[in-house]
Image (cartoon, rainbow, N blue to C red):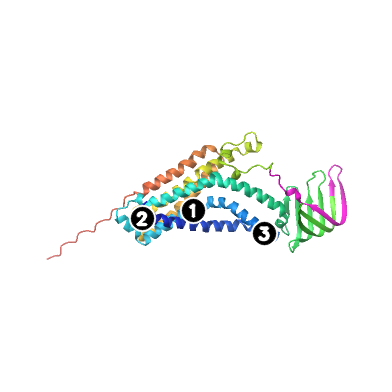
């Protein structure tokens, strides 16, 4: 790598890191509000929050790395043109492919990083994140109960309260327990307390009644109480029996699902499509870079038309992103579309390379001046 390539590559690397960090922070900020609520209202330790954030980071990086890398290409080559550095490089005899080499090296680096995340780090982090988040929701479930809403604690338990004071004191409580389908229970109380004990979340209610319906004979039994406690431990999951989601599986488990498992059979197309998406999505990094370079480095270079080219690049990248998402969605319906997930980014990259060598338009020569009349 000569000095010019190192110079461009260094600027591309710095811009990619900055753009990716900004995008990751923006996505993390929108997705982590629920986790912050656990720390603030649920008195959970700060290390738990940091661990959950770290485990969610691979998924964020996979999403924003292609966008960050192509944003770095647009910014770096636009700056080189604005400072007339690209004009000097062209004048020194550097062709389009030599000018594009640092961007392609940066794209190749991002592709390698994306494959490491897609094939290993993401499923590994997703497994740990899902286990930890389920345990957090079980231990700190009372944090996620909101006033004035019917809160489904589990498939069989719904909790409602009119007002919440100091995060633990409740008023106007209604709890419907349908764990026993033949004898559902409805509990109404004037006030109560939310508590997180060593045995799990619990609601202690005062001054209310417990109504139990016997569906066999249609009899309603009512019990009035001064104090009553109900255990919400039902939400604690059994991690051994939980079905592994697609994002928790490695590539071999996605492309070859367990056909002896009924849930894998029902989700066969979804699992295989996710496997093809893991393998093909990093190829779009090169396709995005080549499409952008095909617009920025084709024809005549100059600051006068560079702004218009940036707009064309942005519109083109939006179209390519929509095309990538459409192919991924179609594959989840019909696996015969899967080869297009690999072929399309390759064709886009080839088209971008061909566009870089588009000949410059010839300028019309000015007409010769007529000799002055004698």
Q: Residue furthest bottom?
A: 374
Query: Mark 3 vs mark 2: which is more N-terminal?
Result: 2
What distance separates the C-alpha of mark 3 from that of mark 2?
Answer: 49 Å
The C terminus, quarter of image = bottom left
Q: Nearer the viewer, residue 97 or 359?
A: 97
> Which residue lies under the disc numbered 1?
67
Residue 100 percent across, percent down from the top left: 38, 51
Q: Marks 1/2: CA distance?
A: 25 Å
Secondary structure type for disc 1: helix
User: Front-most of 257 and 112?
Assistant: 112
Which tag is nearer the camera, tag 1 or tag 3? 3
Say which element carries label 3: helix
Drawn side of residue 141 relative to residue 212, left or right:
left
Which range is magenta?
212-239
Residue 39 is marked as 3
The residue positioned 78% from the left and 54% from the top of the image is: 202
């Amino acid at each position: 790598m000569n000095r010019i390539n190192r110079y461009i590559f260094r600027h591309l690397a710095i811009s990619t890191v900055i753009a990716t960090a900004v995008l990751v922070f923006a996505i993390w900020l929108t997705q982590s509000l629920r986790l912050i609520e656990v720390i603030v209202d649920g008195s959970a330790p700060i290390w738990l929050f940091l661990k959950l954030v770290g485990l969610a980071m691979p998924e964020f990086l996979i999403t924003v790395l292609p966008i960050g890398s192509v944003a770095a290409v647009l910014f770096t080559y636009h700056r080189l043109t604005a400072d007339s550095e690209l004009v000097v490089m062209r004048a020194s005899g550097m062709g389009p492919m030599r000018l594009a080499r640092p961007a392609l090296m940066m794209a190749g680096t991002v592709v390698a990083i994306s494959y490491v995340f897609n094939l290993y780090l993401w499923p590994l982090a997703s497994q740990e994140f899902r286990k930890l988040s389920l345990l957090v929701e079980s231990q700190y479930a009372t944090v996620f109960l909101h006033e004035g809403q019917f809160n489904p604690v589990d498939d069989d338990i719904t909790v409602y309260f009119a007002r919440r004071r100091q995060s633990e004191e409740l008023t106007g409580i209604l709890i419907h327990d349908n764990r026993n389908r033949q004898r559902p229970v409805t509990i109404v109380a004037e006030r109560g307390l939310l508590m997180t004990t060593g045995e799990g979340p619990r609601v202690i209610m005062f001054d209310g009644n417990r109504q139990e319906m016997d569906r066999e004979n249609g009899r309603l039994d009512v019990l009035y109480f001064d104090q009553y406690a109900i255990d919400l431990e039902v939400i604690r999951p059994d991690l051994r029996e939980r079905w592994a989601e697609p994002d928790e599986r490695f590539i071999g488990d996605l492309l070859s699902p367990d056909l002896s498992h009924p849930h894998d059979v029902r989700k066969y197309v979804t699992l295989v499509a996710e496997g093809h998406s893991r393998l093909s999505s990093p190829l779009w990094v090169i396709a995005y870079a080549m499409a952008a370079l095909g617009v920025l480095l084709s024809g005549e270079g100059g600051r006068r038309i560079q702004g218009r080219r940036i707009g064309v690049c942005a519109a083109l990248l939006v179209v390519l992103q929509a095309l990538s998402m459409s192919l991924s969605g179609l594959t989840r319906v019909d696996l015969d579309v899967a080869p297009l997930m690999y072929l399309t980014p390759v064709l886009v990259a080839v088209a971008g390379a061909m566009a870089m060598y588009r000949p410059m338009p010839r300028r019309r020569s000015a007409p010769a001046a007529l000799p002055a009349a004698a």
